[in-house]
């Protein structure tokens, strides 16, 4: 695929725009206020299919022509959605089989959005037709900056169990395994007497009388992710053939489990994300930070773009807590710090009716004289002054492994030693411990080479195939430091157990004899030197001939057994942590591995974006309280003044961006 890039000249600022919900007088008002707010890019018409094609083959583009002209005349660019996110009612009524079917076999009714089965050949064909109409009509418009295919694949419907999905699933299996015997072998169908004699006997893992076959479940996860990627590719192909020079994206839903984003990102030109951290969650900044680290890591050679965030409250949680004054600004800089080339919102003008009438927007029901509009406009103004950061990137020598196969293998429907040991919870707890010792990480994926990293953290990797384990061995043998968490290397690519106690026995010099999950609320002690810490949720009975036992179990049935080990392997070393640990224990181990001081919990984050000439160090205070921080010297590009290094007070939700010429970049004093 040719390498197309979206390289804006300045930071992008804007929102989803739904002009079809408003009168033409309101459009004039929108343009006036967009200018006040410094909006330079809008997204439209995401849910516009039924307005564009109200009857089959009958297109009404006039309204879209007119608003695009108006935007362009006023210096506002746009990314055009192909408008395929929701099929019109006429299409669904003509072909009811487009509607998705859930796990229980229930066909879902029209009346919300995303009402399609990702494997429907009819739906796919109609999306291609619409994408081609859009590309032919607007592909040469000077205001068009990139294509936005569909919207948030996998939101609402990510797994469909209808006959089209069954048939595609079988095709997918045939392509992967060639014969039914190979499937029987991979899925070990002798267990519980599930042997198949013919491909046609295989169905998706719908609700059954008991637990479904784990290998079938894992393949169905992979297939379903691929089905959405295929749908994306069908539209991308049309757009590429008509507009070969316009970059293509589809907006992601942050760290989502539904789609393998590493795979999907490799097929688009620009990574865009919709991020909705919950301000009422005391750890929302940690979750956001992990998410943004992932977004910037999906394409490491270019910036990404925050395509949606809420100006204040959303409307889809049980309780939708608004962003406090100043918090939206800080949260926007958070994404910018991690390499986003702009900040966009859902949405420009708050809807008067419909599901999202209580969702905050840049311009709310009370108009321009409102807190939110004042805050977003001030941010727009401020960002227009700091466009020099555009194009710069965040780089790290520390990798943090994220893997969809393992996440899917640990799904709740599985028969596992403990469903309380959750993939995302484990990832977040390791990420949080690294965050607290100011270790910025890149996310890495098993398809990548690992050699540009000095240290790689693997919070958990239940599924590990031979190729990945060899890559990890090579990484350590050539001097890398590896830290592996519990329940890793347990199953192969087919979700069958690696015999003998895991695939990492050689590398870690440790064998897991028995997983030893802890009951709800149970803790056990581990000792590291003189200190004791608590393990919760998960422990393991390890047999180890490691070079060092870093920690032992100090209570419970595993007392005296190794809990954390270190093995020297070639020129490097691998640490294995066999249990879920409280944060202070992880911090102590991680800071020793990284040779950095262990720091008490804090709410500050330091991230550096760099280009050829300058480093831009973002210092972010995620708490509402003033914090006293040790900062480097540098030119604060937001305050427009030089700052001496040393202790400084940073206001609640405060941010500074310290610019330094690259050659003089100094260590934090
Ligand atoms: C996103 C979606 C938008 C809007 C937003 C509200 O998931 O892409 O269309 O619904 O949520 O928070």
Image (tube, rainbow, N blue to C red):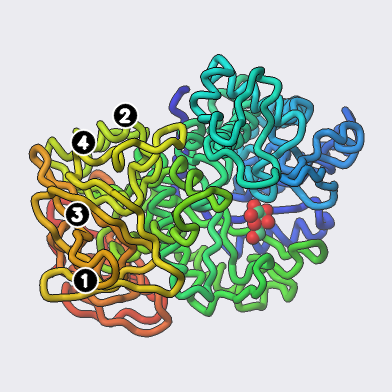
Question: What count of labels does the image hold?
Answer: 4
Name the disc covering residue 124, or none: none
What residue is disc 1 on?
554
- In the structure shown, which secondary structural element does the residue marked by tag 3 occupy? strand
Of pointers 4 and 1, the one earlier in the residue sequence: 4
Nearer mark to the viewer, of 4 and 1: 1
Give the residue at mark 2.
467
Mark 3–mark 4 distance (CA, rounded to whole Å): 38 Å
- Tell me the residue at 35%/36% (across/down): 498
Task: Check whether the beta carbons of the residues at disc 4 and disc 2 lie within 8 A of each other.
Answer: no
Q: Which mark is residue 473?
A: 4
Name the residue nearer the viewer: 393 or 182: 182
- Dividing the picture into quadrants, the one containing residue 600 is bottom left
Residue 331 appears at what percent x and percent y? 46, 66
In the rendered view, would you say 176 is above or below 29?
above
Vertical position of residue 67 compared to residue 519: above or below: above
For label 2, the SS is: helix
Identified at 34% across, 65% down, the residue is: 432
Q: Disc 3 to disc 1, how far (Cα)? A: 51 Å
Left or right, 629 with respect to 94, comes to left
What is the CA distance from the residue labelled 1 to the residue labelled 2?
36 Å
Instruction: Count residues near mark 1 (Cα–Cα under 10 Å), then give few for <14, some for 14-19, many for 20+.
Output: many
Residue beneath disc 3: 661
Q: Residue at x 14, y 52 (%)?
A: 566
The disc, 1 or 2, on the residue closer to the chain's N-terminal end is 2
Alpha carbons under labels 2 and 3: distance apart: 42 Å
Q: Are marks 1 and 2 in contact (CB under 8 Å)?
A: no
Residue contact between numbered discs 3 and 4, judged by CB atoms under 8 Å = no
Crowding around mark 3 (Cα neighbors within 10 Å: few <14, some 14 to 19, many 20+) is: some
């Amino acid at each position: 695929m040719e390498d197309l890039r979206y390289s804006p000249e300045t930071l992008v600022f804007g929102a989803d725009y739904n002009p079809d919900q408003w009168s033409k007088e309101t459009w004039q008002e929108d343009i006036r206020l967009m200018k006040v707010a410094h909006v330079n890019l809008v997204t439209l018409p995401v849910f516009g299919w039924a307005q564009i094609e109200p009857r089959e083959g009958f297109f009404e583009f006039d309204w879209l022509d007119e608003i695009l002209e108006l935007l362009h005349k006023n210096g506002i660019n746009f990314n055009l959605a192909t408008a395929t996110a929701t099929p019109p009612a006429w299409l669904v009524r003509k072909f009811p089989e487009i509607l998705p079917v859930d796990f229980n076999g229930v066909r879902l009714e029209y009346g919300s959005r995303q009402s399609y089965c990702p494997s429907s050949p009819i739906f796919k064909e109609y999306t291609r037709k619409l994408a081609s109409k859009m590309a032919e009509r607007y592909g040469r418009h000077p205001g068009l900056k990139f294509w936005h295919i569909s919207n948030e694949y996998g939101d609402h419907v990510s797994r469909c169990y209808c006959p089209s999905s069954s048939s595609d699933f079988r095709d997918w299996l045939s392509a992967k395994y060639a014969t039914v015997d190979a499937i029987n072998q991979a899925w070990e169908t002798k267990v519980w007497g599930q042997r198949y004699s013919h491909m046609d006997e295989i169905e998706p893992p719908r609700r059954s009388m008991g637990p479904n076959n784990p290998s079938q479940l894992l393949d169905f996860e992979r297939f379903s992710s691929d089905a959405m990627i295929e749908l994306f590719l069908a539209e991308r192909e049309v757009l590429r053939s008509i507009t070969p020079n316009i970059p293509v994206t589809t907006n992601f839903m942050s760290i989502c489990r539904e789609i393998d984003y590493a795979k999907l990102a490799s097929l688009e030109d620009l990574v865009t994300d919709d991020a909705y951290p919950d301000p009422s969650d005391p750890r929302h900044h940690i979750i956001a930070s992990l998410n943004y680290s992932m977004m910037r890591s999906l394409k490491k050679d270019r910036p990404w773009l925050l395509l949606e965030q809420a100006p204040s409250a959303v409307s889809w949680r049980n309780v939708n807590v608004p962003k406090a004054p100043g918090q939206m600004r800080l949260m926007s800089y958070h994404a910018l710090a991690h390499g986003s080339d702009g900040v966009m919102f859902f949405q420009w003008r708050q809807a008067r009716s419909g599901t999202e009438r209580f969702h905050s927007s840049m311009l709310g029901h009370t108009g321009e004289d409102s807190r939110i509009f004042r805050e977003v406009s001030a941010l727009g103004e401020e960002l227009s002054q700091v466009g020099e950061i555009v194009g710069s990137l965040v780089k790290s020598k520390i990798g943090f492994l994220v893997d969809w196969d393992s996440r899917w293998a640990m799904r709740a429907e599985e028969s596992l030693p403990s469903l309380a040991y959750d993939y995302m919870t484990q990832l977040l707890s390791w990420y949080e411990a690294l965050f607290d010792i100011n270790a910025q990480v890149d996310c890495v994926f098993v398809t990548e080479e690992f050699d540009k990293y000095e240290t790689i953290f693997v919070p958990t990797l239940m599924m590990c195939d031979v190729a990945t384990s060899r890559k990890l061995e090579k990484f350590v043998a050539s001097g890398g430091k590896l830290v592996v968490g519990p329940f890793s290397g347990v199953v192969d690519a087919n979700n069958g157990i690696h015999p003998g106690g895991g695939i990492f026995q050689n590398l870690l010099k440790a064998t897991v004899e028995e997983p030893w999950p802890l009951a709800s609320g149970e803790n056990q002690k581990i000792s590291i030197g003189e200190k004791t810490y608590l393990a919760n949720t998960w422990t393991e009975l390890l047999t180890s001939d490691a070079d060092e036992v870093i920690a032992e179990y100090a209570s419970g049935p595993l007392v005296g057994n190794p809990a954390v080990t270190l093995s020297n392997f070639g020129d490097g070393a691998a640490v294995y942590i066999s249990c879920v640990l409280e944060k202070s224990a992880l911090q102590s181990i991680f800071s020793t591995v990284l040779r950095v001081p262990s720091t008490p919990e804090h709410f500050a984050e330091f991230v550096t974006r760099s280009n050829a000439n300058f480093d831009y160090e973002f210092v972010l205070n995620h708490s509402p309280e003033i914090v006293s921080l040790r900062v480097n010297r540098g030119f604060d590009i937001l305050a427009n003044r030089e700052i001496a290094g040393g202790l400084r007070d940073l206001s609640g939700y405060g941010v500074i961006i310290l610019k330094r010429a690259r050659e003089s970049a100094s260590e934090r004093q």
